[in-house]
């Protein structure tokens, strides 16, 4: 990956957006939330040198998690960066945070079929980091980590079991699919009875 001006700007922008709520942490941890979008950007940089995709990974939660909710939009991202980055970020954004968890995940799942490969790659990197973090949390702290989620252990596992094949269905040569399969296998091993 080349450290371009767009990537540099996206890093600074993501840090600024996510530091506005300085107390925001990864669920159930003391890890600052901003480490998530930065890690998604790093994951993407392993498999692409497209600065727009990497920037979208760095910015992928800016619309969804910006405080106050709704103060960041696809239009503002397009103005600040470009239309492709804004489209990718919008593609991986839950469009209505007021809906219950199940409904939000169903809507996000249904949208996968409409995504271009670049958005699918951003989605895959996001899922991979979340799943890898979950596996690490389970390894270190046991199954109680599911208590911090909006869904049960069974629902969370079922979501990943459905989501990863769906990502493969719409892009079978996705460069992160093997990593996703491996992370899912680890989750199933860690949670088996």
Image (cartoon, grey):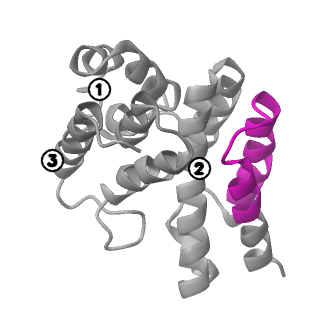
The image position of residue 36, as x and y in percent, is 40, 55
Mark closer to the chain start, 3 or 2: 3
Picture quadrant of residue 137 = bottom right
**Quarter of the figure that contains the N terminus:** top left
Q: What stretch is highlighted in magenta?
A: 156-184
Choose mark 2 or mark 1, whichever is in front. 2
Dominant SS of magenta comes to helix
Residue annotated with mark 2:
127
Q: What element carries label 3?
A: loop
Q: Disc 3 versus disc 1: distance between alpha carbons?
A: 14 Å
Q: Check residue 4 for magenta coloring.
A: no
Picture quadrant of residue 47 = top right
Q: What element carries label 1?
A: loop
Labels 2 and 1 touching (C-beta < 8 A):
no
35 left or right of 43? left
Residue annotated with mark 1:
70
Q: Please tell me how crowded label 3 is: few (under 14), some (14-19), or many (20+) other residues with Cα within 10 Å.
A: few
């Amino acid at each position: 990956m080349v450290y371009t001006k767009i990537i540099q700007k996206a890093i600074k922008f993501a840090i600024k957006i996510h530091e506005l709520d300085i107390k925001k942490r990864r669920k159930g941890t003391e890890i600052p939330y901003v480490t998530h979008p930065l890690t998604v950007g790093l994951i993407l940089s392993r498999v692409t040198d497209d600065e727009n995709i990497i920037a979208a990974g760095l910015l992928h939660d800016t619309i969804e998690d910006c405080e106050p909710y709704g103060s960041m939009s696809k239009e503002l991202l397009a103005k600040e960066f470009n239309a492709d980055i804004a489209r990718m970020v919008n593609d991986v954004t839950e469009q209505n945070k007021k809906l219950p968890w199940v409904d939000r995940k169903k809507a996000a799942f249904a949208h996968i079929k409409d995504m271009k490969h670049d958005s699918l790659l951003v989605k895959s990197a996001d899922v991979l980091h979340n799943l890898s973090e979950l596996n690490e949390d389970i390894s270190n702290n046991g199954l109680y980590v599911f208590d911090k989620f909006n869904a049960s252990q069974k629902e969370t596992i079922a979501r990943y079991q459905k989501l990863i094949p769906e990502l493969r269905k719409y892009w079978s040569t996705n460069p992160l699919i093997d990593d996703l399969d491996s992370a899912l296998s680890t989750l199933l091993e860690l949670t088996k009875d």
